[in-house]
């Protein structure tokens, strides 16, 4: 069941539909993070347009996403290696 919510970012209202309370919480948290970043960029670059500041926010978030994906991939590979090592060790101890 979809629920309608409205997020306000930089004075603009964005009506959205969410499918769960958890998704609403995530969207509201994301909007707050965006507001915070926009405020920082506004203080740092007062002459830049909203569009420019949104590009900065998007770039920052994309860099963080790619960094997190790379860390997750490395951890996944490490878990796979450790799992293989553990399986081999257990097979050795059964002999």
Image: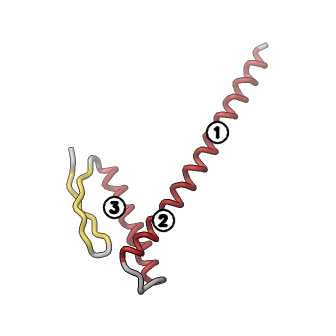
Picture coordinates of residue 12, whole percent (x, y): 26, 72
Asked which quadrant contains residue 94, the reply is: top right
In the image, which disc is placed on residue 38? none
Q: Is 69 placed left or right of 13 in the picture?
A: right
- Whichever of labels 1 and 2 marks the residue nearer the N terminus, that label is 2
Q: How did the renderer colour the structure? A: secondary structure
Between marks 3 and 1 in the image, the one whose residue lies nearer the viewer: 1
Between marks 1 and 2 in the image, the one whose residue lies nearer the viewer: 2
Q: CA distance from mark 1 to mark 2?
A: 27 Å
Q: CA distance from mark 3 to mark 2?
A: 20 Å
- Which element carries disc 1, helix, strand or loop? helix
* Residue wearing tag 2: 59
In-front residue for pair 94/77 = 77
Asked which quadrant contains residue 1, the reply is: top left
- Whichever of labels 3 and 1 marks the residue nearer the N terminus, that label is 3
Residue furthest to the top: 95
- Whichever of labels 3 and 2 marks the residue nearer the N terminus, that label is 3
In the image, which disc is placed on residue 28? 3
| Residue in view at x 20 percent, y 55 percent | 4
Q: State the count of labels.
A: 3
Vertical side of 2 occupied by 25: above or below: below
- Which element carries disc 2, helix, strand or loop? helix
- Which element carries disc 3, helix, strand or loop? helix
| Residue in view at x 63 percent, y 44 percent | 75
């Amino acid at each position: 069941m979809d629920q309608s919510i409205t997020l306000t970012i930089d004075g603009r209202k964005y009506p959205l539909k969410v499918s769960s309370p958890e998704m609403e919480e995530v969207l509201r948290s994301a909007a707050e993070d965006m507001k915070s970043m926009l405020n920082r960029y506004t203080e740092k670059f007062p002459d830049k347009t909203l569009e420019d500041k949104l590009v900065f926010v998007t770039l920052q978030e994309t860099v963080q996403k790619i960094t997190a994906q790379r860390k997750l991939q490395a951890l996944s590979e490490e878990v796979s290696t450790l799992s293989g090592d553990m399986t081999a060790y257990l097979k050795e101890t059964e002999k």
